[in-house]
Amino acid sequence: MKARMSAMMCLLCLLGSADLTRADDPYSQRVADPYALSDGLPTMTSGTLEPYLSVMAGIALPFSQDATFTGEGPGSGLPTVVKDIDYQTKHSYGGNAGIWFPTRSKLLGFDLGVEINGFIWYPDVACCIDNYNRDPSTGLGTTTEIQAIYVGTNFMVRYPLAISESYPNGRWFPYVGVGVGAHQMATRPGGMGGTGFYTAITEQRHTTVAFQGVGGLKAHLFKYVAAFVEAKYIHADHSRLTTDRTGTTEPFPGSDTFQALAFHNPYQSTINTILIHAGLSMHFDWKP
């Protein structure tokens, strides 16, 4: 009897030891964390791609820049260059779509990617900047409403952290990128101030090439859903923006509709903007 009890006790001890060993195994089904770290880098299936779609919102912080006027329009006797145009900080929103190529086994742990992104913001110049949208001799001035849009392509590099064998093969992804795209600014002299372009009549649009740098951090909340925060820097040179230097654009009496023949003064300006966006993205594990 004692021999049987001793044998049963030994068997239970062996089973318990094996169970604990399986619980410590990161590949065991008993592991609660599906992203448990492996001892080495994962070996991904050849041809695995990671497409994604994102939406984002945040703020745009344009730098104050000089405006160089061409001499056209009323107020031609005013100074040609106006220093430090105060483009306003405003809200911004947009989205992107891209694809990652997980190649870290060949690139020192880094992945490569490409994306198309687009966003919009409103860097208005509020009333009143002397010799830009106000005539200091008369004191008349107006707001210059501006709408900015950027659409471009970025080439991206990321470094996965908290790597696991199971998708998404990492919980955290710091990333950087550079790109080029189209930058459009639409200006409307004599704006209402604060109403944006929802009801404004766009008087002048100019599109040019712009360059972008981006850096951010993305973290997976769930298997296919991630949150991110990123900062972008945009540089563009525009040559056909407009404003009302004399501040004489006025609405019709008793109406918010501005005169069709508003006073325009074309100018050139370099636009540099920092945008800070946060958003959510959907990722997909695609094996063609």
Image (cartoon, helix red, strand yellow):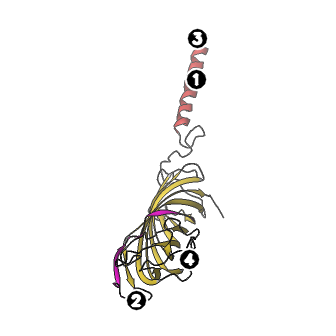
Magenta range: 75-95
Does the magenta segment cover residue 80? yes
Quadrant for residue 275, please give it: bottom left
Q: Amino acid at mark 2?
A: Gly
| Closer to us: 176 or 78 | 78
* Residue hosting label 4: 202
Dot 2: element: loop
Mark closer to the chain start, 4 or 2: 2
Instruction: Tell me the quadrant of the picture where the C terminus can be found.
Output: bottom right
Of labels 1 and 4, the one closer to you: 4
What's the residue at 56%, 36% (across, down)? 22
Frontmost of labels 3 and 4 is: 4
Q: Earlier in the sequence, mark 1 or mark 4?
A: 1
Q: Whole-Å distance between the Cαs marked 3 and 1? A: 15 Å
Q: Which residue is mark 3?
A: 2
For marks 2 and 1 on the same chain, the one whose residue lies earlier in the sequence: 1
Q: Give residue 226's mark.
A: none
Residue 6: x, y in percent? Answer: 56, 16
Side of 224 relative to 229 (left or right): right
Across and down, in percent, residue 35 comes to 54, 46
Q: CA distance from mark 1 to mark 4?
A: 81 Å
Q: Residues within 10 Å of mark 4 (few under 14, many from 20)?
A: some
